[in-house]
Amino acid sequence: MFPKPGQNHKLPGNYRPISLLSSIGKIFEKIILSRLKEECHELSIIPNEQYGFRAGHGCIHQLLRVTNTVTQGFNHKFYTGGAFLDVRKAFDRMWHNGLICKLIQFKIPNYLIVILINYLRNRTFRMKLNHTLSDIGSIKAGTPQGNILIPLLYTIYTSDFPKTNQIMNCFFSDDTAIPAQGSTINYVIHTLQKGLNNIEKWCTLWRVAISTDKTHAVMFRKGTSRKELKTLASFDEDLTWDKEVKFLGLILDNKLTFRRHLKYNTEKF
């Protein structure tokens, strides 16, 4: 366990578990990863909206999708509202049985499924504090830290994320944004709320946790308005409208001026 920097080290949630993997195991993981990638490509499992850990796709490309959508909305006098979701411990909470179920549904070859079942199942852990050892616990979710299979397995696990024609899904690994665009603010808010409701059902079914306190909503629009925006809701928590949000390292303000981002990097430099 390694403590997270700048966090209260008295809380167990502020530590990051690290697995020590054997060299032979790492070589085996690379072979499985290569085979799994081939199958995902042939079966078209990975959605086009996922830009993380894919050849020819990068963080900049996903940011361009979001900013270009907002800019085009400005040009056509449309409003663009976006909810930027924070998935809580995405890799650590990936449900083993749910992942295996999806691998079967996507018709991944049986030999790969059996290998992954044997790789994930029957894993245990125990903690040592000073000279005291805890009882042995069973790991039923997540994959070993440092495993190169994690990103692809998570991408497969979330490949059936709710999708509608009114909302543009934007993924980069576990970073998720759902922008919606329309000619009226009420339409945008209604569309986003409908999308959040579908996401809540999906997350409940597949045991994916969303940190509502770290989830932000921004309404991108030109001009100013004193009209108060209707609050969005997710998992019985209200999502307040913010003037800016940090997505994939880029600070997006509601006017898309990038002034806050430039100021942040200037002070950092």
Image (spheres, rainbow, N blue to C red):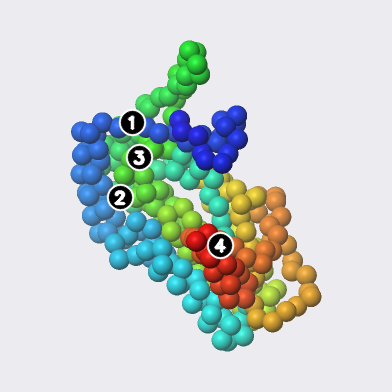
Q: Amino acid at mark 4?
A: Glu
Crowding at dot 1, Cα within 10 Å, few <14 / some 14-19 / many 20+, comes out as: few
**Does the residue at mark 4 contact the one at mark 2 (Cβ under 8 Å)?**
no
Residue occupied by mark 3: 146
Distance in Å between CA atoms under marks 1 and 2: 31 Å
Relative height, residue 126 to residue 65 (above, below): above
Which residue is drawn at the image coordinates 52% and 64% (left, top)?
A: 265
Distance in Å between CA atoms under marks 4 and 3: 33 Å
Residue 122 seen by the camera: yes
Q: Amino acid at mark 1?
A: Leu
Q: In this rendering, which labeled residue sits more in front, label 4 or label 3?
A: 4
Name the element at disc 1: loop
Task: Return the x and y of residue 8 as percentages of the image width and height.
Answer: 60, 35
Distance in Å between CA atoms under marks 4 and 1: 38 Å
Q: In this rendering, which labeled residue sits more in front, label 2 or label 3?
A: 3
Residue occupied by mark 2: 107
**Does the residue at mark 4 contact the one at mark 3 (Cβ under 8 Å)?**
no
Q: Amino acid at mark 2?
A: Lys
State which tag comes first along the sequence, 1 or 2: 1
Q: Quadrant of the N terminus?
A: top left
**Does the residue at mark 1 contact the one at mark 3 (Cβ under 8 Å)?**
no
State which tag comes first along the sequence, 4 or 2: 2
Which residue is drawn at the image coordinates 21% and 38% (left, top)?
A: 28
Residue occupied by mark 4: 267
Relative height, residue 232 to residue 146 (above, below): below
Residue occupied by mark 1: 20
**Does the residue at mark 1 contact the one at mark 2 (Cβ under 8 Å)?**
no
State which tag comes first along the sequence, 2 or 3: 2
